[in-house]
Image (spheres, helix red, strand yellow):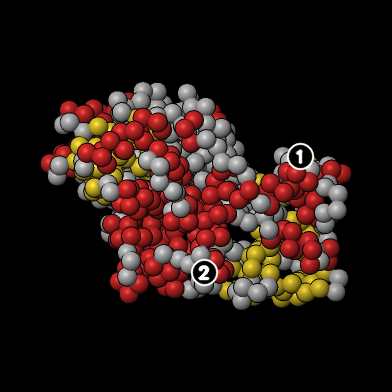
Amino acid sequence: MTQLVGALPPRWRLRDPYAHQNGIPRFPPVVAAVLAARGITTRQQADAFYKPHLLPAHDPLLLPGMAEAVQRVARAIDDGELIALYGDFDVDGVTSIAILREGLAPLGARTLPYIPDRFTEGYGLNFGAIRSLAAAGATLLVTADCGISSVAEVAYANELGLDVIILDHHTVPDVLPDALAAVNPKRIDSPYPFDELAACGVAYRFLEVLYDHLGRPFEDADFIDLAALGTVADVAPLVDENRRIVARGLEVMRTGGLRPGLAALSRVAGVSPERFTSETLGFALGPRMNAAGRLAHANIALQLLLERDFRRALELANELHALNRERQRQTEEATQLAEELLGPADVPLLWVVTDRIAPGIVGLVASRLAERRNRPAVVLSRGPEESRASARSIPGLDIVAAIRAEKHLLVRHGGHRAAAGFTVRNEHLDELRERLTATAAARLGWEPPRRVIDIDAEAPLSALDGLEVKGLMRFEPTGHGNRKPVLLSRGVSLLQAKPVGATGDHLRLTVRHGPVTWRGIAFRQAGAELDAEVDLVYSLQPDVTGQGVELEVLDIAPSAIARPLERGA
């Protein structure tokens, strides 16, 4: 791999140096310190955190446009109209369409699902698809996980006689499309108290209101698994309502039986349903479903979720598994190519343009580059006249805002603060690169940044008894916005460090502190400096048997070097 200029070890920073002084009485000390570092200092707050399913749900009618959307769909059902359901090709988009399809069918709705082809149509609404849906007889178009930036496309749909309802969660542009309803928690006029719902969460809340409007009982177990999967796969923050959705969805999947498609996918992924966690959704199921839209067509993933026959679902799951293996291979090769094209120099913004990386994996490559080099990354798949790009950012730069500022150079664009995409004509590539690089330099500076690992608590490894471990493992569901507890333990004896993995990039560790021996895994740290006694930054995770717990080592350093711990985050 290319050696990076200025690749410095990460900084260790204690989130709240005074957390141990504000612990919750009668809680295990390490657990109380971790909770306090996250602002949870009372028993009532801790109960709400540990029991998210008991939290009251926000009123979905506070979402702007929700009432109008429900009334229009109810009328379409009564009149027997054909409702086109237009989604995105990622897991959030696919689960949103599956939720709408499954939820509208028992109400007697006639629906026509449509997911565009990534390679021939690109992201979002497009004129050709709108024409074909109108020609098929659709009179109502409901978008999910797209549409909020499609001003021209929505106007065209209106010209063809289609009413448009938008269910989206992407950053809202200055000018909204002229849709009958645009339901998006990020609208500046939204009184809804939580603005981080994924699109599948918006679709789920829409169904709740629709069923109530029609006087029908709403069985959340029929849809909450899909909402949980889409929420985690889209890396939505697992706080507030998202935490409630994912916790409830995991409960249903672990105890209530899986729909055939997810049961088949869990079998090919080698994960039993009773061991499902948020990581299962994000790293086992989600990537396999996403592989369809990246290399073939997302309809394969949609068919899997809607399939009732397990044998047919297993065929689809195996197809997704094979696509995912190919996606992994292509991503490794494309990332290596991108590193070679970048070279060792450090710049404020990583920019790769090539016709040798497929549009379906540019986002994955950008994510790898941003993680490895701790710089925002833009990777473009160059076509004859236009290039399609995915961008991934780091803290300190709102990438979608930076891109939107250059919208005069773009064909289309959209996304979030940390991840975005756009299409640009090739004659504008050089100017766009210069302008985005200048923005990144202004926000982040030119000096090579150092990755920061925020630590919840410092504690001896020997202090982790059964109660501490149980309390720390109950932070599930964990992920973006509610990461696993991160601890620092110093003076740990390193008994064994063995390179593992196909390329030997990881370390399988055995360590001891006091009377207890722990096993652990340190991903992508085979080149770490080691000694007989080390300091570890780590989280806890289930071991390979699912019956025990091991260390997930995030960073490791010889104790003799005494890596300093910064105070306050």
Which quadrant: the C terminus? top right
Furthest-left residue in this view: 135
Instruction: Indicate the position of residue 190 as horizontal and vertical percent values.
Output: 49, 27
State the separation of the CA atoms marked 1 and 2.
39 Å
Q: Is residue 179 left or right of residue 393?
A: left
Q: Residue 420 shows which numbered tag?
A: none
Q: Amino acid at mark 1?
A: Gly
Q: Residues within 10 Å of mark 1 (few under 14, many from 20)?
A: few
Q: Amino acid at mark 2?
A: Pro
Instruction: Indicate the position of residue 499 as horizontal and vertical percent values.
Output: 61, 73
Q: Residues within 10 Å of mark 2 (few under 14, many from 20)?
A: many
Q: Is residue 467 left or right of residue 446?
A: right
Residue picked out by circle 1: 568
Q: Say what secondary structure mark 2 lies in.
A: helix
517 is higher (above) or lower (below) than 17: below
Quarter assignment of residue 534: bottom right
> Which one is in front, 358 or 119?
119
Mark 1 or 2, closer to the camera: 2
Q: Residue 273 shows which numbered tag?
A: 2
